[in-house]
Image (cartoon, helix red, strand yellow):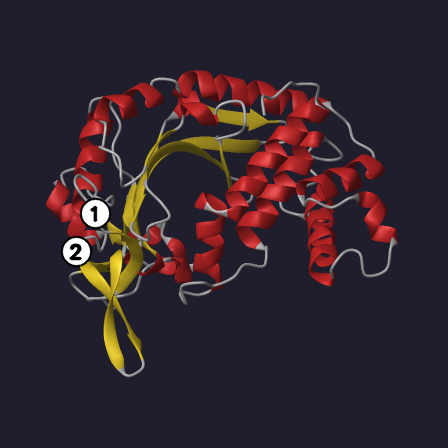
Amino acid sequence: MAHELDFSTGRAAIALRGGKATAWHGFGETIEPSDDVDTIIAKAGLAYEVRLAPASFAADGEMHAAEGWCATYRTDTMRALGMVSDSRYSLDGRQPRDVVAFFRDFLRERGLSIETAGALRGGRMAWCLAALGPDYEYLAPGGDLTRAFVRMSTGFTGNDGTTLDLTTVRVVCANTQRMADAETKGRQYKVSHSQVFNGPALAAAFGLAGERWRITCDAWNAMQARRVSDDEAREFFCRVSGIDPADLSIDGKVSTKARNGLQALAEAYRNGPGAQLPGARQTAYGLLNAVTYYVDHAATVRDTYGDGKAAARLASSQDGTGAAVKSRAFKFAAELAGMAVAA
């Protein structure tokens, strides 16, 4: 897990309540209740700015301008972060400090406070997290506790914007499921870097958190009540993976990688953390948690940015392909449980 963090400056870019005692692999600084924004930023490794520079490329021994494009880079290490359009991309209100300051003020108005802040993927993403408290906890049979958090993040690669969303952590195995399922993701706040940052819109999205939590808990209850057969489990994992079950019997039709993925999902369903608890064993809820556990901890990912497999897996599970897989798993598990979910 340590390699999920940004170590560009020689130390882990993360700060959190409880400090090293609760951090990944003992990394991290401690956020104190009295810390101001600048202190949190310094502790979290976010004391850098992101700027734009005209992009160029080398060809035939000469440098040429890449017209219409700029590179984003961080000012402390001068490391390039991404390629963006020079006419549409804006950093107004999206600097790492802006994210922490806005989120801190936003939380204070609601009686909450920042619990974690930091940088990921070499500084390509700045993020903050806060727990929503006891009113947003879900206890399944067997002591299977899930807690809800609100997360704000902004990225600088050109492929991501600024997002506020809810995420849940299943304590028994610490896997996460974003509650941006098909029924509710239209209420998630997300704005690209080509759009104006809109604080009131963010507040309106957060105002629907209670409704989203109720819908999600109702879905989980229905999933736990829905017993599934081995054949249904197999079909579920094929569907989530985009595989026709009939193709499994045809040599060469399904790649070895895809078959290995199905086997890993089946293993997580049978023997993963919490798989034998009453609410998960042989239920649609167990199918969902097998997928979220697999995506967050075991899935094969491509390390596009050279930050390590764990960092790539985290990025995928939160904002990329893995997040889409988890959203599909929620939709399909809800359908198994008889709950209609909008496409």
| Mark drawn on residue 96 | 1
Q: Is residue 313 above or below residue 99?
A: below
* Up/down of 62 relative to 41, above or below: below
Q: Which disc, if any, is residue 120?
A: none
Give how far across and how far down residue 116 sits, in percent.
Answer: 30, 43
| Above or below, comparing residue 236 to residue 300 in the picture | above
Mark 1 residue element: helix
Mark with earlier residue (1, 2): 2
Q: Nearer the viewer, residue 55 or 234?
A: 55
Q: Is residue 190 left or right of residue 233?
A: left
Image location of residue 149, percent across then percent down: 39, 33
Could you say where residue 226 lies in the image, as x and y percent from the top left?
Answer: 74, 24
Q: Residue at label 2?
A: 48
Image quadrant holding the N terminus, namely bottom left
Residue 184 can be seen, yes or no: yes
Which one is in front, 105 or 257?
257
Badge 2 marks a residue whose secondary structure is loop
- Whether residue 18 is visible: no
* Residue found at x 87% / y 55%: 250
The quarter holding residue 150 reads: top left
Residue type, label 1:
Pro
Viewer-closest of 324 and 292? 324
How far across and how far down the image is residue 89, in percent? 24, 45
Q: Quadrant of residue 336?
A: top right
Amino acid type at circle 2 is Tyr
Q: How would you rate the neighbour count of disc 1 (Cα within 10 Å): few for under 14, some for 14-19, many for 20 or more?
A: many
Furthest residue in direction bottom, as rendered: 61
Mark 2 closeness class: few <14, some 14–19, many ≥20 residues within 10 Å: some
In contact (CB < 8 Å): disc 1 and disc 2: yes
Identify which residue is drawn at 16% across, 63% down.
76
Q: Nearer the viewer, residue 187 or 9?
A: 187
